[in-house]
Image (cartoon, rainbow, N blue to C red):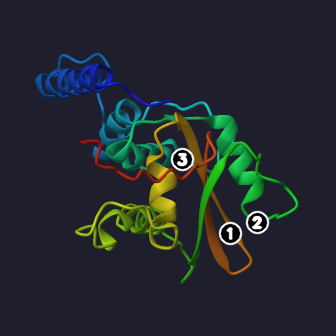
Amino acid sequence: MWLSLQEKIVQLLIIVTVSEATCRGTFLMKFTSKDEQLAGIKLLLFPAFGCRNTLISDEWRQRVLDHHNNIRRKNWDCDMENNAFLSTCDQTVQIPQAYASNSATFQITGKKCDINQNTMAVLKGWSDQAVAVDLSGGAVYNVQNQKEFGIMVFGETTGFACSYSQCGNDGKLLCLYNKQFVVVNFVLKNCMP
């Protein structure tokens, strides 16, 4: 589920209204601490996705969704998230053939893994593939250098989801997309006589 611009504006107006009312002391529910204020704002900023995996936060889902939607609009699909979660470590759970997928492994160091930082680094690496190749000679898709980016921006994809797991000593991120990625290279020909 992605939010339309109108929905985000409504949420922002709610936040401003709540903040102003709280400052004036007119809001019915008073927040007693900064943590409670932050929790209230997070509820407004990060709507409930309704996905089954409670180990993954809606805040993380929203960050991943926002990163994708900054490139190409898609909807978050909780069923696809469940498929991604079941497929991250256990190779016996097959990814549906109709789906495209991107995956990455990252190191988990120290006692606490910052999954937000690790995830955003992976997603940034995938989206940076768009500028990693010299396109001055023509915009031709290069599967070796732009595979993950190509899957992220494929025009027929409308839904996706990602999940992560600790697999042995490493972390694994897996994103599934609801359309199989098809590479089509067009060659422009001179149509003039």
Q: Which residue was labeled with disc 3?
A: 57
Q: Earlier in the sequence, mark 1 or mark 3?
A: 3
**Residue name at image x 35 percent, y 39 percent:** 36
**Residue name at image x 43 percent, y 48 percent:** 153
Q: Nearer the viewer, mark 1 or mark 3?
A: 1
Which residue type carries mark 1? Answer: Gln
Q: Position of residue 60 (x, y in %)?
A: 48, 50
Q: Position of residue 143 (x, y in %)?
A: 51, 67
Res 80 → quadrant: top right
Which label was assigned to residue 44?
A: none
Q: Position of residue 1 (x, y in %)?
A: 50, 29
Marker count (numbered): 3
Q: Which residue was labeled with disc 1?
A: 166
Q: Earlier in the sequence, mark 3 or mark 2?
A: 3
Q: Which residue was labeled with disc 2?
A: 89
Disc 3 is placed on an element classified as: loop
**Residue name at image x 52 percent, y 33 percent:** 158
Q: Nearer the viewer, mark 1 or mark 2?
A: 2
Closer to us: 187 or 193: 193
